[in-house]
Amino acid sequence: MRSDIPSNDKIKVKLFAILRELVGEREITITVPTGITVNHLNDEILKKYPQLKSFSNKFVTSVNCKVTAGNTIITSKDEIALLPPVSGG
Amino acid sequence: MISITNNPLNLQEIMFELEDNSAGALSIFIGNVRNQGRSGNVSEIYYEAYSEMAEEKMREIEIEAQTNWGIKKLVAFHRIGNIKVGETSIIIGVSSEHRDEAFEACKYVINNVKTRVPIWKKEISKESQKWADGVLLE
């Protein structure tokens, strides 16, 4: 592989509740440069699915079942999910 | 014992799981779907969960309850899917030596399940369907 060509990761992202309904999919795949952060991934998701923009401050991102800071670097091996406000019970 | 399930909840099963001869107290919280929600009349609620993470968070809450109150056993079952008015969505059961720990731990667990576990509900009526306002996870 040529080292001057940036490599990409295909990141799978689970969606729940209102976010799942707005997109119409339980899981989406986003192709991003390798070494991307959670914040960067979220920006890419909002670009691809603008219907989520009005919810951009109404969800958190989990990585491997833990809510994670925006500067966390993720890979295609991580399990990513977007979680709107919870209301169980 | 923690479970997220599509099946109707069975109180007898939960009582069986809580049996412990060293426990003098059992405290049980049962949450039912009621006919009024924030958006008005409700005929049923649709519950959705991120099950893997939800069970992990519930186990975390279980450990906190054991650490804080020294409880003997905890059973927390949450039903998901469509649940009609009058049916049960959640049962929390706690056994402990004495009643104070059982009451306190049971209240702690249900309060924390509502605010820390990735489960969502949509209130459904003849006229509308609306996702409930909730709490953003930290």
Image (cartoon, rainbow, N blue to C red):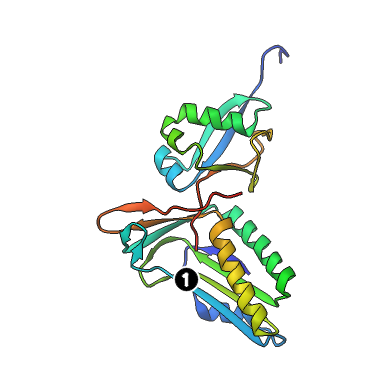
| Drawn side of residue B133 relative to residue B118, left or right | left
Residue B17 picture location, percent across and down = 62, 78
Secondary structure at numbered mark 1: strand
Q: Residue furthest left?
A: B127
- Relative to residue B43, is residue A38 depicted above or below? above
Could you say which quadrant of the image residue B56 lies in?
bottom right
Question: At 56% across and 65% down in the image, what residue appears?
Answer: B111
Kindly identify the residue that appears in the image at 62 percent across and 61 percent down: B58
State the residue at coordinates (56%, 43%): A60
Left or right placement of residue B121 versus residue B27 in this view = left
Name the residue nearer the viewer: A43 or A31. A43
Residue A75: where, in percent of width, then height? Answer: 67, 33
Q: In this view, does A30 lie above or below B57?
A: above
Label 1 marks a residue whose chain is B
Left or right: A22 as drawn, with respect to B95: left
Disc 1 designates what residue? B31
Residue at position x 49%, y 76% in the image:
B10
Give coordinates of residue A33: x percent, y percent: 63, 23
- Above or below residue A28? Residue B93 is below
The N terminus of chain B sits in image quarter: bottom right
Can you tell which quarter of the image residue A61 is in?
top right
- Dot 1, crowdedness within 10 Å: few (<14), some or many (≥20)? some
* Image location of residue B110, percent across then percent down: 56, 67
Residue type pointed to by label 1: Gly
Residue B108 vertical position relative to residue B53 in the rendered view, above or below: below
* Total numbered badges shown on the rendered structure: 1
